[in-house]
Image: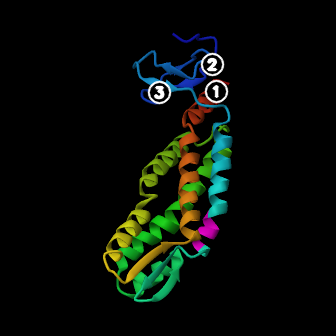
């Protein structure tokens, strides 16, 4: 059992049991449920902020630069993500256009906004339940981050079936991939245990 005289430094992410593993250990086995937990880095929220800021920096050129160039029967046309959404909706492809709009423009911004909020307020011990729910939202919507990339891959596969067509990725595609990567890293480095650790410390103090 953890020393009751010492405030618990870590909380099991499975059963929520507070405990004090050895300071040199990078993981610990929960004394209550036996599950294995990783010891979070004291720089966790700072890394989340840094990766989120990097993703935000790439977000704007990702939506401003051309995403892909389509060559059809000798005619070449480049489009940004927003331009592609507009064209899809103008041609009546509302479901696909809406999915691309949400997955490429709305969801990344929502996820980054939540990550910024969590990283900047993780240790103030306030609104812990709300922050936990926001973290769970990030985990859920993160699964949709690459949905429009999958749609693009399907489009490229279909288009390339024709002998007179070709699709080429543009700088916007690379920028968007970097947004996805750094956002995933920001989410992965944030440890929700920080929220409850400081919440308990405030209650105890």
Name the N-terminal-most of marks 2 and 3: 2
Figure quadrant of the C terminus: top right
Label 1: which secondary element: helix
Query: Residue drawn at (53%, 22%), measured in percent from left and top?
Result: 27
Instruction: Pinpoint residue 69: horizontal percent, then vertical percent.
Output: 50, 78
Identity of the residue drawn at 67% across and 31% down: 42
Q: Are marks 2 and 1 in contact (CB under 8 Å)?
A: yes
The reply to whether discs 1 and 3 touch (Cβ–Cβ < 8 Å) is no
Q: Position of residue 175 (x, y in %)?
A: 59, 64
Magenta residue check for 72: no
Q: Quadrant of residue 150?
A: bottom left
The residue wearing badge 3 is 16
Q: Which of the marked residues, 2 or 1, is nearer the chain's N terminus?
A: 2
Q: Which residues are magenta?
A: 59-63
Q: Nearer the viewer, residue 38 or 161?
A: 161
Marks 1 and 3, how far apart in space? 15 Å
Q: Secondary structure at mark 3?
A: loop
Q: Residues within 10 Å of mark 2 (few under 14, many from 20)?
A: some
Would you name the residue on which mark 2 appears? Answer: 7
Q: Residue at x 55, y 12 (%)?
A: 2
């Amino acid at each position: 059992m953890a020393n009751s005289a010492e405030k618990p430094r870590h909380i099991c992410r499975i059963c929520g049991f507070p405990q004090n593993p050895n300071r040199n250990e990078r993981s610990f086995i929960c004394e209550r449920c036996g599950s294995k937990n990783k010891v979070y880095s004291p720089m966790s929220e700072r890394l989340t902020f840094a990766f989120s800021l990097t993703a935000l920096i790439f977000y704007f050129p990702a939506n401003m630069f051309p995403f892909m160039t389509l060559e059809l029967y000798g005619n070449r046309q480049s489009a940004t993500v927003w331009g592609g959404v507009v064209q899809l909706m103008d041609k009546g492809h509302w479901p696909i256009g809406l999915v691309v709009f949400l997955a490429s423009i709305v969801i990344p911004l929502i996820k980054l906004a939540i990550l910024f909020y969590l990283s900047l307020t993780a240790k103030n011990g306030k609104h812990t339940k709300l922050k936990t729910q926001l973290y769970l939202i990030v985990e859920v919507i993160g699964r949709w981050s690459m949905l429009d990339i999958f749609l693009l891959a399907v489009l490229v596969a279909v288009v390339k079936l024709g002998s007179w067509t070709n699709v080429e990725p543009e700088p916007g595609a690379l920028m968007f991939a970097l947004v996805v990567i750094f956002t995933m890293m920001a989410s992965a480095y944030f440890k929700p245990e920080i929220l409850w650790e400081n919440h308990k410390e405030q209650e105890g103090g």
